[in-house]
Image (tube, helix red, strand yellow):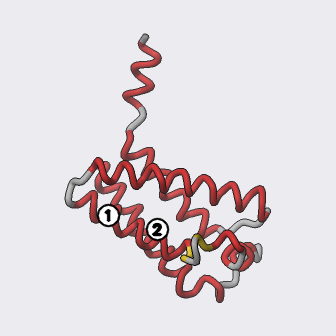
Amino acid sequence: MKKVIIIALSLIAFVISFYLYFQGKNIGCVLNGCNNVLSSPYSKVLGIDNSLLGMFYFFIVGLLVIINKENIFKVISSFAFLYALYLIFVMFFVLKELCYLCLAVDLSAIIIFFTIYDFRKYFQKIFRG
């Protein structure tokens, strides 16, 4: 079941990232936040567009889940989780703009992280004593 959730989220987020990379600057957002977020200095890392990084990440995630490379997947997802939190922070508190498509991609990375780590067993150990 975890694999299905991760592959589905990866596919959806890949498609959104693809769309943002090729059409992102041309989309008309209801709140005008998309254009501002996608054209901000935070939209690139070392000259590489965040949408392109997203496409790469979600493709790799899908591939790693299919070929059962869980350890590599966990490391990559940990970095993606932290980066997604950073991008959400930037959207809300630095730019004070909201791009719903960007948020959907970031939330997908966060959900994938929590799905792969399955924190329930850790909470059960803590609360059972």
Residue depicted at 27% across the width and 57% down the height: 65
Instruction: Note whether 86 is above or below 102 in the view shown.
Output: above
- Kind of residue at disc 2: Ala
| Residue that extends furthest to the front in the rendered view of this protein | 46
Looking at the image, residue 126 sits to the left or right of residue 65; the answer is right
Closer to the N terminus: mark 1 or mark 2? 2
Quadrant of the image occupied by residue 93: bottom right
Residue 85: x %, y % from top left: 60, 52
Q: How many marks?
A: 2
Looking at the image, residue 40 sits to the left or right of residue 86; the answer is right
Residue 51: x %, y % from top left: 53, 74
Q: Secondary structure at mark 2?
A: helix
- Report the front residue among 12 and 74: 74
Residue depicted at 49% across the width and 58% down the height: 108
Report the residue marked by disc 2: 13
Numbered mark located on residue 62 in the image = 1
Instruction: Note whether 115 is above or below 123 in the view shown.
Output: below
Residue depicted at 23% across the width and 60% down the height: 66
| Residue that extends furthest to the top in the rendered view of this protein | 129
Instruction: Note whether 22 is above or below 31 in the view shown.
Output: below
Badge 1 local density, few (<14 within 10 Å), some, or many (20+)? Answer: many
- Kind of residue at disc 1: Gly
Quadrant of the image occupied by residue 42: bottom right
| Residue that extends furthest to the left in the rendered view of this protein | 67
- Separation of residues labelled 1 and 2 (CA atoms): 11 Å
Badge 2 local density, few (<14 within 10 Å), some, or many (20+)? Answer: many
Residue 28: x %, y % from top left: 69, 84
Residue depicted at 21% across the width and 54% down the height: 68
Residue 118: x %, y % from top left: 38, 38
